[in-house]
Image (cartoon, helix red, strand yellow):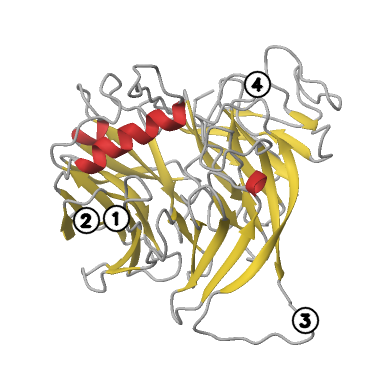
Amino acid sequence: MSGSTRREFLGAAAAAGGTAAIGQVPAGTPPRDWTDPRTGHRIVRLSGDEGGNKLYFYRNSFTPQGDLMVMSSPRGIVLVDLKTHARRILVADPRADLMFTARRSRTVFYSVSDPGTGQPTDRPRTFFAVDVDSGRTRRIARIEAGQVGAVNADDTLFVGTVAYGDAPLQPDVPDPRNRRFGQAEYAAVGPDGRPLNFAKAKGVRMLQRWAARVPMELFVIDLKTGQRRVIHRAQDWLNHPQFSPTDPGQIIFSHEGPWHRVTRMWRIRTDGSGLAATHRRTMNMEIWGHEFFSPDGKWLWYDLQTPRGQVFWVAGLDLATGRRLWRRVGQNDWSVHFNVSPDQRRFAGDGGDADMVAHAKDGKWIVLFTPEQIVDGETQAYDPDLVTPEYMRSTRLVDMSAHDYRLEPNVTFTPDGKQIVFGSNMHGANHVYSVAI
């Protein structure tokens, strides 16, 4: 049987290593199906026994019809049926770097970097598109350096970034974030010569890269012709380019670096017009980032802290009207990444450990949020020019106490809004799981 047709099955009726009793975690292979004893929510392992990793939290992982999800594995690129949990290899090539799915067609995009030393982003790479049903693959484009972050709403353009002359964030590790499999590695020492913890070491490396002022470009690639076109040049650290899910010409991107030193979020059109910051600092040590579009493309959501590590919000900007909506989250509910459900009624967070910016003593959870209005008194005055504050009521879904947050869980709602998908190493190896809401 060929790799492209080989299937594996999950679920209670699966082979050995299947359903675990409540509170029991079998040794060796992680359980395939269990109920979290602290939350009562059902969790299913979506990745095979070889392990796997999901895409970054804002990257599209699903077919337009919502029936299939894509993930990476040591064997290549894997498709998962969201109803049956059956898996099959789509691209049987361990070199294939999964990028994202198309918005309109049943297509998965991936890249293959040329062999060599140094960072993968400094080497030539070729981009491919593969049809999930037929398995037919076509070459799209080739670039000499850089990386691509997203495809636009009508599947006609990629957006990406390239840096000229940058060094690895971790000098002795060519790709410290290991984007394909999600595990980050950072190390540094403090002024006293002692090793810093992971979060502080990452901060040191981020500061060094930001201060280098490396020339960069933001570019688009035409998927029909393969032509690359630069739309913005800067010495700022350009990162996280994203397309609106509904407006083919709208891009957001970030100025990366220590969040308290940068104006993080920006917008620009595909022709290079409309460059503008989307949030401005109002106090010292105010930080914001990990931005993402709402499913309808009307809102920009992001992690906002006023100031850093003290007061936490999931903040929203209506891109058409400029209206601002800030939803307060508690210290133990702060998350590395947040995301929003397809109907936009609920949010999810993937938690964080005590060394991270919130320094939460009990923050290692996958959390579901329900926004609630704040009403003071019988009537409430409303000024559209001011920020509208709300509160996030939280429900804990998954106990992540055994998870090492060097791997970011990257929570994502399934297209039907009934489950949240996340990555975790809670049982040792990196795996992809879903939890029922």
| 3D distance between C-alphas at marks 2 and 3 | 51 Å
Q: Residue 283: image x %, image y %?
A: 42, 62
Q: Position of residue 120 (x, y in %)?
A: 26, 31
Instruction: Give the residue type at disc 4.
Output: His
Q: Nearer the viewer, mark 1 or mark 4?
A: 4
Task: Report the side of 126 relative to 392 (left or right).
Answer: left
Of mark 1 and mark 4, the one earlier in the sequence is 1
Q: Quadrant of residue 358?
A: top right
Mark 4 neighbour density, 10 Å: few (under 14) some (14–19) many (20 or more): some
Gap between marks 4 and 3 measured at Cα: 49 Å
Residue 341 spot, x, y in % from top left: 63, 59
Q: Is residue 191 left or right of residue 44?
A: left
Q: Residues within 10 Å of mark 1 (few under 14, many from 20)?
A: many
Position of residue 132 relative to residue 51, above or below, is: below
Identify the residue position indicated by label 4 in the image: 427
Residue at the spot 64% in from the left edge and 34% down from the top edge: 46
How many marks on residues? 4
Q: Secondary structure at mark 2?
A: strand
